[in-house]
Amino acid sequence: MKVGFVTVLGKTNVGKSTLLNTIMKRNFFIVSSKPQTTRHRIIGVLNLEDAQIAFVDTPGIFEPKNELEKAMAESIKFALVDADIFYYMIDVYDLEIDEGIFKKIKDKTKFLLINKIDKVEKNIILPIIDKFKDYGFDEIIPVSALKNQNIDDLLETTKKYLPEGERLFLPDQISDRPVQFFIAEFIREKLYFVYGQEIPYSCAVEIEEFRDNFIKANIIVEKDSQKGIIIGKDGERIKKVGILARESIEHFLGKKIYLELWVKVKKNWRKDAELVRRLGYYE
């Protein structure tokens, strides 16, 4: 059996989480048009008849400005330490590679994935491949994460580079994270959907209670004014978040649940290293 770790690297919004959702055939990596929505290093375990592949999603590459973003940057460092294969993802609209990150994987097994090929004519793709032929990538594979183009070929090629070994995870295990983690992520994903640009970046989600069919979650914000925005007039906006999140959670758990959402203010929590750690952002 082929077994190993594959770490996915690339800029924010390049399509890393979409790729992994497509590979895993389930939506548990947050997907949003907003940059920097992935905050954690998350492992998704793909169990095949002849392979077990642990895919590591990472936050996009960026310059950290507060304790939360420092924790996100730290998770990238951890992901660079050890993997059997590195996917470095770019897209057809942005061909720039982060030289600092590339140097760290230069001597390792690495694939260049050119994403969003469904957006351009085929004659555009070959010159892009030629541009990177001298970079030393073991494979250069054009894909469309959203449209599931060339994903099967990517997986077959990946298996060829992985070592033989015993399973690292149980056959029915899909991640290294507990169920509560994904519940919080589904809620956070809906915050991006409902509130647009700024507010979700100031939010965190903690699961206070999870038993049987009952979930109590707190949405953490930095200011009293943000609490009012999250709740909305007559509670309409937070109600919408609850409805959307509940649908995703029920689909994920395969059962009906009751979701109770509360909004709490923890002033400037993103700048508080201890609070950031307590909310689970440091590895």
Image (spheres, helix red, strand yellow):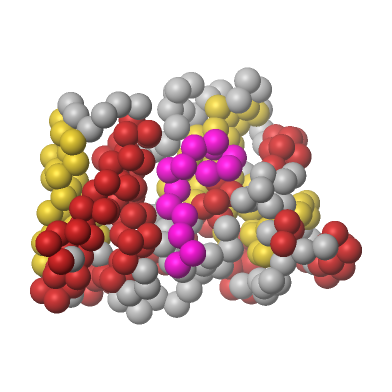
Q: Residue at x 56, y 67 (%)?
A: 11
Q: Is residue 125 magenta?
A: no
Residue 255 vertical position relative to residue 74 in the rendered view, above or below: above
Judged left or right of residue 43, residue 158 is: right
On the question of residue 77 being in view, the answer is: no
Q: Residue at x 68, y 52 (%)?
A: 144
Percent of width and height locating residue 247 = 33, 40
Q: Quadrant of the C terminus?
A: bottom left
Percent of width and height locating residue 227 = 14, 68
Q: Residue at x 66, y 48 (%)?
A: 147
Q: Is residue 31 magenta?
A: yes
Judged left or right of residue 232, residue 252 is: right
Q: Residue at x 51, y 47 (%)?
A: 56
Residue placed most toward the observer, 58 or 147: 147
Residue placed most toward the observer, 241 or 65: 241
Percent of width and height locating residue 115 = 68, 58
Residue 177 vertical position relative to residue 72 in the rendered view, above or below: above
Residue 20 vertical position relative to residue 174 in the rendered view, above or below: below
Residue placed most toward the observer, 111 or 165: 111
* Residue 24 position by quadrant: top right
Percent of width and height locating residue 177 = 35, 40
On the question of residue 153 being in view, the answer is: yes
Q: Quadrant of the N terminus?
A: top right
- Residue span colored magenta: 21-34
Give the number of marks: 0
